[in-house]
Image (cartoon, grey):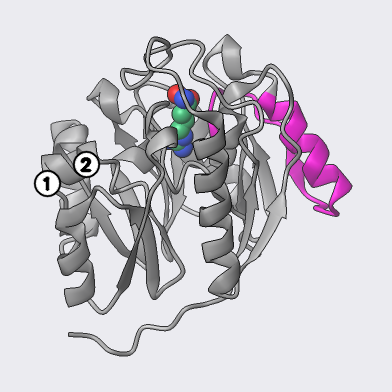
Amino acid sequence: MRTDRVAAPRRYLMCPPNHYRVSYSINPWMDPDKPVDPAIALFQWEDLRDRYLSLGHTVEVLDPVPGLPDMVFAANGATVIDGRVFGAKFANAERRGEAPAHLAWFRANGFPEIHEPEHINEGEGDFSATASWILAGAGFRSSPQVRAEAQEFFGRPVIGLELVDPRYYHLDTALGVLDGDEIMYYPEAFSPGSQAVLARLFPDALIATEDDAAALGLNAVSDGLHVLLPLGATGLFQPLRDRGFKPIGIDVSELHKAGGSVKCATMELRC
Ligand code: ARG
């Protein structure tokens, strides 16, 4: 087992669930007849935030906007790499108002390079950064054309991956970056060609089971040592430990009701 893993301090952006509800359905997890408990949602969100703080990370807070119940999923509002901000353009009308709220936050907080995208994309929902590449999911929420736009803006190679299972409508529901070019993913969420691309680029990846994918276990946040992931993804804990990571289970049951989890609620502000 590797024992040389180190946690690097990170800067995250989160948005409290003050207006979080499941009042519409834009993915198979969302059922407005299974309401969210707002008090539990807030408690769970604060617990996640406090975990980051206790691990030495910085958490910036984006003010929630009434009428935008999914805004708690802060990861969808932009993608930030090398301090450069690539804005979101949401696929569904229900979430479109989140993109300008994010852009206003970045403008007010001194990010000099902000790109308003031409093509549909939901921020870190479909963009993940490894050491060598930007991985870009498409199929449900992002346009395949946004890949070229992102590659030009970031100056990093963008690898396109096709999502085929509506339960895994965002890349970050089917694939999690652990450290450098190490990832974990659920192959069946991807088209055969994209599975082959993943196997070629990441031959040593941790492969998740169907149960762990359905617990949204791939929707995890790693600082290089600690991996924060939903409590229900029990099958991932030991494989992560075997690789030298420290898994930390988080109860985010209320976020799961909207098809989101730890990572969706956490945007990484990469410098
Ligand atoms: N209800 C939200 C939606 O369907 C959940 C977003 C989850 N975010 C994520 N990064 N996967 O858009």
The amino acid beneath tag 2 is Ala
Quick one: SS at disc 1? loop
Q: Residue at x 80, y 53 (%)?
A: 111
Q: Is residue 149 visible?
A: no
| Amino acid type, callout 1 | Thr
Which numbered tag is attached to residue 213? 2
Inspect this view and state whether residue 188 appears. yes
Distance, label 2 to label 1, CA atoms, is 6 Å
Residue 15 located left or right of residue 44: right
Which residue is farthest bottom? 4
Left or right: 181, with 190 as reference point: right
Q: In the image shown, does 76 or 68 lie closer to the viewer?
A: 68
**Residue 139, above or below 104:** above
Percent across and percent down for residue 216 are 30, 41
- Is ligand 1 closer than 8 angstroms to the Cβ of mark 2? no
Q: Secondary structure at mark 2?
A: helix
**Residue drawn at 38 percent across, 49 percent down:** 251
Residue denoted by label 1:
209
In terms of depth relative to the viewer, which is nearer, 82 or 34? 34
Q: Position of residue 136 (x, y in %)?
A: 41, 40
Residue drawn at 47 percent across, 78 percent down:
7
